[in-house]
Amino acid sequence: MNYSALNVEQHGAVAVISFNRASKANSLDEASWSELRTAMRWADDTPEIRAVVLQGEGKHFCSGIDLSMLMGVQARIKDECEGRMREKLRRLILDLQDCVTSLEACRKPVIAAIHGACLGGGLDIALAADFRFASSDAVFGVREVDVGMVADVGTLQRLPHVVGEGIAREMALTGRDVTADEAMSFRLVNRVVPDGDAVKAAALECATLIASKAPLAVRGTKEVLNYGRDHSVADGLNQVAGWNAAMLISDDIQKAGMAAMMKTRPVFRD
């Protein structure tokens, strides 16, 4: 499809999805949210895509929700009935949550390559990726408290799993900037590299490595990790037993075994 807020490219088996509103610091207008979900569903549905890199054009990854969109919410939900107005607002919030969750719902691993600002809604989205790389100039922040609202599309649910309760609460309650080095020490990001070009290159290199692995195993590993995060160890063990009972015996495992015996590199079907 034609995108207005994103740029979507295919590099081999990797989809590179870029926020493309550099003049607006990649703030999230209405199209940004819906196009992100569309792009993630395309990546999920396209067999030739095995991994995804999410990045930003220009000086920033994503500076959060476009204030004009935020200010326009009142007009969107206007109704003579108070109850129906509140119902519209709830449905709008749920829809934005679904746009963010599309990163998790995508069976292909998603790497967020972050440079510059990663604030508010941008952090919501980055946290829904499988993991994050950052440039040394990256800045992270839960900014919703500064505009008088509770973050409602994912940060408060995902951040504690990534950095722990204490750090998550500090970030959410203060709204302060977190530098790339702090983010690394908090385990918010996996690595820090010198600049925006370097972080995009590192993410693409890592995504290409993931794309070389057995696709069924990669997709299954993501699903099992996501399930295990939200369930007990016992539930997770039961779930992975069901997954492998269904998917273990595959062409992929036979090719991997044969390549190991022959000391060659396996080539898997999409």
Image: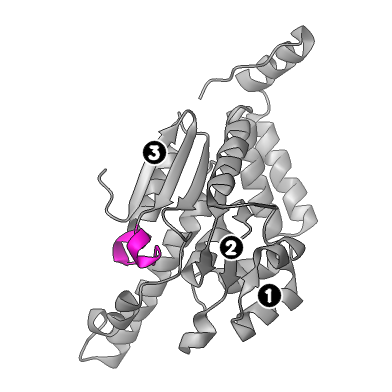
The residue carrying mark 3 is: 9
Mark 1 vs 3: CB contact within 8 A: no
Q: Amino acid at mark 2?
A: Ala
Residue 137 lies within the magenta run: no
Q: Is the residue marked by circle 1 packed among few (<14), some (14-19), or many (20+) residues within 10 Å?
A: many
Q: Earlier in the sequence, mark 3 or mark 2?
A: 3
Range covered by the magenta-colored residues: 21-33
- What residue is drawn where x is 35% and y is 78%? 67
Label 3 and label 2: CA atoms lie apart by 23 Å
Residue 244 vertical position relative to residue 138 in the rendered view, above or below: above
Q: Amino acid at mark 1?
A: Ala
The residue carrying mark 1 is: 168
Image mark for residue 138: 2
Q: Amino acid at mark 3?
A: Glu
Q: Is the residue marked by circle 2 packed among few (<14), some (14-19), or many (20+) residues within 10 Å?
A: many
Circle nearer the viewer, 1 or 3:
3
Residue 24 lies within the magenta run: yes
For residue 36, side relative to residue 76 (left or right) = right
